[in-house]
Amino acid sequence: MFKAMLLDRQEDRSTARIAGLEDSQLPDGEVTVRIAFSTLNYKDALAITGKGPVVCKFPMVPGIDFAGTVGTAGYTAMLCVQAIAVHGVKPGGGDVLVTGANGGVGGVATALLAKRGYRVVASTGRMNGAYHDVAS
């Protein structure tokens, strides 16, 4: 169980409360992160107050700005790592190119591959601020 701010819709207004949630309540494909630090940004404030059309589906846990440790990796990223192993690519057998490496799936795939000892070459379409160090 974990605690989270939960937004819900009651009649014509948004409500916010701190709720205890189980992992089983998360949508399929979500990643769990042990949060060390968090903040609410402008869009979160719009969602909480109902002042903007930010929330697509209720209930919703707001907040995307945080620092923490990934507890469970995304299914899609892990499929990529498993496919490499199935095709016989082993650490030390050459570089592995991850495209879209600064996105959600690419970032997790880069971290998973580096952790398993692969030498990762990360590619991104962003011109600035796209460099991250990943320790093996």
Image: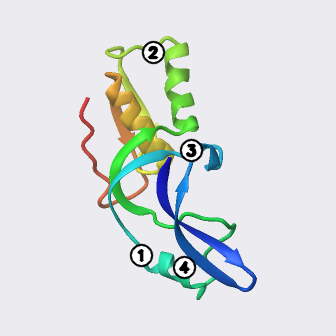
Residue that carries the numbered disc 2 in the rendered image:
89
Circle nearer the N terminus (2, 1): 1
Quick one: which residue is furthest to the top in this view?
A: 88
Q: Is residue 124 above or below residue 72?
A: below
- Left or right: where does residue 61 sit relative to residue 103? right
Q: Secondary structure at mark 4?
A: helix
Who's the residue at 42% across and 44% down the image?
A: 107
Q: Residues within 10 Å of mark 1 (few under 14, many from 20)?
A: few
Residue 48 is labelled as 4
Under mark 3, the amino acid is: Asp
Q: Secondary structure at mark 1?
A: loop
Who's the residue at 56% across and 44% down the image?
A: 23
Residue 122 in picture, x, y percent from top left: 37, 40
Residue 21 in picture, x, y percent from top left: 55, 53
Residue that carries the numbered disc 1 in the rendered image:
41
The reply to whether callout 3 and callout 4 are in contact (CB within 8 Å) is no
